[in-house]
Image (tube, grey):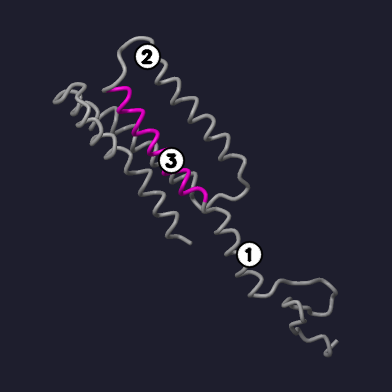
């Protein structure tokens, strides 16, 4: 029994004599790095959702007319979000806290559109294009902030 003191074998794993390989610290660090790299897609996903959502607000408020074109624009955005979510669900690795942070970004973006920036811009500028471009970029900031936070966590 005393001869079975833990020692590193040539594969970098620890073996305490029971014939099971136990990962070494280097193996664990390599796996952590691989998992972090596998989750990097999420930041780009958030940035794309932010850009599309900002574009949707500009189209909805400044470009398309009321009626069927407006409904089609809203439906197009909804289809994009559903397809993007489906694509995201196919990934095996998500960064830690990604779902919570994305939910927060969506909540801030939507609340700003409904209760703060949207009503102010609509009341002051109507359907003028430039103010809506600026307002939609400001409202989409939570998506970009969360994307940057996730990238920095690595």
The quarter of the image holding the N terminus is bottom right
Label 3 or label 1, whichever lies nearer to me, is 3
Residue 140 versus residue 147 in the image, above or below: above
Q: Between residue 19 and residue 127, name the one nearer to us.
A: 127
Residue 96 versus residue 118 in the image, above or below: below
Q: Between residue 124 and residue 19, name the one nearer to us.
A: 124
Q: Secondary structure at mark 2?
A: helix
Residue located 83% across and 90% down the image: 2
Q: Between residue 5 and residue 70, name the one nearer to us.
A: 70
Residue at the spot of label 2: 69
Q: Quadrant of residue 111?
A: top left
Residue located 44% across and 56% down the image: 151
Label 2 or label 1, whichever lies nearer to me, is 2
Q: Between residue 54 and residue 25, name the one nearer to us.
A: 54
Q: Quadrant of residue 133?
A: top left
Q: Earlier in the sequence, mark 3 or mark 2?
A: 3
Q: Position of residue 62 (x, y in %)?
A: 26, 23
Q: Secondary structure at mark 1?
A: helix
Residue 78 versus residue 149 in the image, above or below: above
Q: Which mark is residue 31?
A: 1
Q: How packed is label 2: few (under 14 Cα within 10 Å), some, or many (20 or more)?
A: some
Q: Secondary structure at mark 3?
A: helix
How many angstroms separate mark 2 from mark 1 (CA)?
A: 49 Å
Q: Is residue 151 magenta?
A: no
Q: How packed is label 1: few (under 14 Cα within 10 Å), some, or many (20 or more)?
A: few
Side of 48 relative to 57 (left or right): right
The residues colored magenta run 41-61
Q: Earlier in the sequence, mark 3 or mark 1?
A: 1
How many angstroms separate mark 3 from mark 2 (CA)?
A: 23 Å
Q: Quadrant of residue 109?
A: top left
Q: Is residue 53 magenta?
A: yes
Q: Position of residue 73 (x, y in %)?
A: 40, 20
């Amino acid at each position: 029994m005393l001869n079975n003191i833990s020692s590193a074998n040539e594969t970098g794993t620890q073996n305490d004599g029971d014939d099971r390989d136990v990962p070494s610290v280097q193996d664990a660090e390599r796996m952590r790095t691989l998992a972090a790299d596998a989750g990097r897609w999420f930041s780009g996903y958030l940035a794309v959702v932010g850009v599309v959502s900002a574009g949707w607000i500009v189209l909805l408020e400044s470009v398309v007319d009321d009626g069927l074109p407006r409904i089609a624009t809203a439906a197009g955005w909804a289809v994009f979000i559903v397809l993007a979510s489906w694509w995201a669900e196919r990934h095996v690795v998500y960064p830690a806290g990604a779902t919570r942070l994305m939910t927060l970004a969506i909540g801030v973006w939507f609340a700003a559109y409904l209760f703060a920036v949207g009503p102010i811009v609509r009341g002051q500028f109507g359907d003028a294009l430039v103010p809506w471009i600026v307002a939609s970029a400001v409202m989409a900031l939570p998506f970009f902030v969360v994307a940057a936070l996730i990238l920095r966590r690595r």
